[in-house]
Amino acid sequence: MKHIRGYWLVALIFWWVIATYGLLVRGHLAWPIDGFRYEYWLHAHSHAAFLGWLHAGFMLLLTYALMPERLGRKSFRRLFVFSQAMVAGMLISFPLQGYKGFSIAFLSLFLLGTYVWAFWFGKIPRETRRRFPLTFRLGRSAVWMMLLSGIAPWTLGPVMVMLGKKSIWYNLDIYFYLHFQYNGWFFLSLLALVAYLFEAKGMRFTGKFILRINRLLLCGVLIGYLTNTLWTKPPLWVNFLAMLSVFCEASGLWLLFRKLYGGLKTLHFNSFQKQLFHIILFGLALKVIFQFTASCPYFAELAYRIRDLLIGYLHWVFLGIYSVFLLWWAGLQNIARLRPLFFRIFFAGFVWMDVLIFARGFLIWWKITIPQAMPAWIFWATALMFTGISLIVYDATRSILRNSHQNL
């Protein structure tokens, strides 16, 4: 336990740094800062959010669930330190030069580290696979999606050089990476970790059920990439395939959670933990609705044209689902304390911020004048969210360090 707590604390600190960058970006949009390269800082914020917080979080929790002995080894410590050092390098290099030499080098080295962890995941003992068959199957699919998403950064450089940033292939490459990260690697990891909670309590699933769930979800993820191409106005059959992917994902989620809900009492959630679980379920349901809407030609083009709609959706997924899930799951396992008040400050700020971002997108869509104070409102909402994150990280730091001293 002491190993996972130390690693988790590092991931939380990176989350706080990422939130600091986000607050700075929002401040620049409200009150412009001379010499501030918005795109550069945004690259740093988004890459670190993906890799230093969400990737690190899911990697740590999957390791804790399926190969806990690995956490105590020097090889894992070296890999984790190396990976987070590469993210720190991106946090420095992106604001200075954007997506160029050093930033590309740090990202490339980070990707090499993920291949090492994926290799370790493939060596999980058979007895663990038999004890947690659904967890392992979904986790393995998540790892494959992580590896698949890694193709995009390797090809982005050649695309930029040969075709340029204005090429549709540049955007398709970016969306390929985004999709197989948040709709593949993070999404399937979340479901694997949910399955682990039930399998650890003795719940068993048939091989046929596991295969069916895994196939439906994988089809949803793989075909779902087409949703990210609809802004190019492809033939209508591509839209139908995109809708089919949403149906596959929704069917897989429905069958999985219908099965799990019967064993919910065995987990003995307190009222706060139950609230977070329902927030996650609600978030996943909204995610499916957003994806179905985006598979329609008109709304696909609208989401591409009005960036606030896309940004609002991505923030909902990253903060409203995945970040909430990581905090909730770590709290269930007593890895780090999560006080309800601090979480509610964070979540209230997030909801306020996201509602404002969506509202601005809808005002653009309906051709209604946007209030001049809107960037300032979004900044203050972000500041409230940042305050909640700061309190969560501070409280977790105190509890983790206190536990470490008690164990000495």
Image: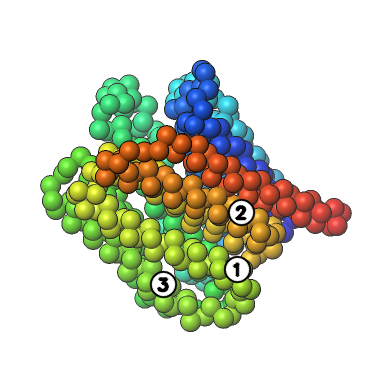
* Camera-nearest residue between 18 and 138: 18
How far is mark 2 from mark 1, CA to CA? 16 Å
Compare marks 3 and 1 and give the one earlier in the sequence. 3
Q: Is residue 380 visible?
A: yes
Instruction: Tell me the SS state at disc 3.
Output: helix
Residue with the mark numbered 2:
345
How far is mark 3 from mark 2, CA to CA? 31 Å
3 vs 1, front mark: 1
Q: Quadrant of residue 19?
A: top right
Q: Quadrant of residue 303?
A: top left
Q: Is residue 391 above or below residue 305?
A: below
Residue 320 appears at what percent x and percent y? Answer: 49, 55
Which kind of residue does numbered mark 2 sit on?
Ile
Instruction: Tell me the SS state at disc 1.
Output: helix
Residue 197 appears at what percent x and percent y? Answer: 56, 70
Local packing at callout 3 (Cα closer than 10 Å; few below 14, some 14-19, many 20+) is some
Q: Residue at x 33, y 56 (%)?
A: 290
Q: Residue at x 69, y 63 (%)?
A: 334
Quadrant of the frame with the N terminus: bottom right
The number of discs equals 3
Left or right of residue 218: residue 133:
right
How far is mark 3 from mark 1, CA to CA? 20 Å
Residue with the mark numbered 3:
256
Compare marks 3 and 2 and give the one earlier in the sequence. 3
